[in-house]
Image (cartoon, rainbow, N blue to C red):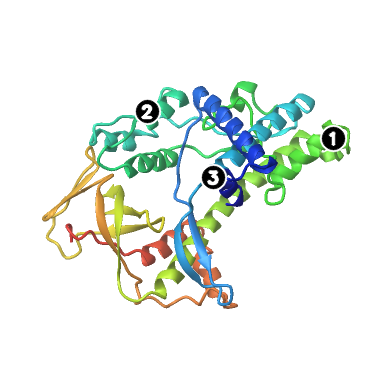
Amino acid sequence: EEAQAVMDDPAAQDDLARGLRTLNGLAKALNARRRARGSLVLASPEVRFKIDSETLDPTDVGVYAHKEANAMVEEFMLLANTSVARFVTQRYPKVAVLRRHPPPRPGAFDVLQRALRTRGLSLRTNSSKEVAKSLDEAHDPADPFVNKLVRILATRSMQQAAYFRAGSSPPEDYWHYGLAADIYTHFTSPIRRYADQLVHRMLAAALGVEPLPAEALLPESVDAAVATMNERHVSAQHAGRASVNVYTLFFFREREGVEAEDAYVIKVRENGVVVLVPRYGIEGIVHVGKGAAPGSYVYVEEACTLRGPKGSLSVFQKVRATIVVDKSKPPPPKAGDQHRGATDLYRGGQGAGAAVLAEVCKTCPSDFA
């Protein structure tokens, strides 16, 4: 934020301000070069909480706003990661720790394609470059947020990136689909990722600073390490989502009355829909048809639509949602308490997190009750 303030201040003309603006210009040039290769601009709702310093309870929740300064730092991090990946692989072609992003599986975009057709849009998927261009073109003049929704859903249609050992597959399989990079690794965050520490050690050894331990040169040892890192990475993602769900519940539990917000349908099922509330970056399932006569609600798969007695709901449709806490369930402890209950609440990983979110966001479009 401080760097952004300096770049935005026209009165700031010192060496620091000029240097930041120069770096920002270089970052934009690097970004343009990546985009020309087919690097994707994807999206996911990143929730950010404001926490009371004494009670540790959340006082506000919203979507994290990325600034130009964030993009500048990210661009140079990507450059560092690709440069180090190439360097350590040249030195250790059989054991370097790398990261790749495989292309989407066949049919991965089918549901999104059906939803896009209802809006007169399409997604070309023959290459990452075509996907990137069609994502840029996926605009609804009546609602700019639809483009971000398309990017969110495209992100969820893809496979996850994973760590692997150089030499375990041919170089053409090193490709990182999302970044359109022929080689990539994680190097820039050693304080929070073990993979980055391994890569730092390899770089230090390649530069003659410090030799690698003997086990770091054994393919089977590196294979075991990357398998563990991939497993732990998925577990960390589940824990992070569960933490967001729990703190979202804490936030809404302390608020009186009902919260009414704009929301978007992002998935249609036979018995309801999933909606995203942009204001808070949260999602919830809306179940319909309870007590209704059989056949009252019809799921039209090709149109990604659920039709009911009072209207229909389709993917990308904007609705009004009410957010309340289901107080029929036992309340969890407060965020600042020393407790085991919150741990139990999300110990089950992704499934438990989804259950928490369903309790948090009981949402009902006013025109489809």
Mark positioned earlier in the residue sequence (2 or 1): 2
Answer above or below: position of 163 versus 351: above
Q: Which mark is on residue 144? A: none
Task: Check disc 2 and report the residue beneath it.
Answer: 134
Task: Report how far apart the C-alphas of labels 3 and 1 lie in the structure.
Answer: 41 Å
The amino acid on which the numbered mark 3 sits, given as a three-letter code, is Asp
Rendered location of residue 2, percent (x, y): 60, 52
Residue lying at 66% horizontally and 46% vertically, measured from the top left: 229
In-front residue for pair 235/67: 67
Residue lying at 61% horizontally and 45% vertically, measured from the top left: 12
**Tag nearer the camera, 3 or 2:** 3
Answer above or below: position of 305 versus 102: below
Q: Secondary structure at mark 2?
A: helix
Rendered location of residue 228, percent (x, y): 66, 46
Residue lying at 47% horizontally and 35% vertically, measured from the top left: 41
Q: Quadrant of the C terminus?
A: bottom left
Q: Secondary structure at mark 1?
A: helix
Whether tag 3 and tag 2 are in contact, CB under 8 A, the answer is: no
Q: Which mark is on residue 205? A: 1
Disc 3 crowd rating (10 Å Cα; few below 14, some 14-19, many 20+) is few
Task: Check disc 3 and report the residue beneath it.
Answer: 8
The amino acid on which the numbered mark 2 sits, given as a three-letter code, is Ser
193 vs 72, left or right, is right
Task: Report how far apart the C-alphas of labels 3 and 2 lie in the structure.
Answer: 32 Å
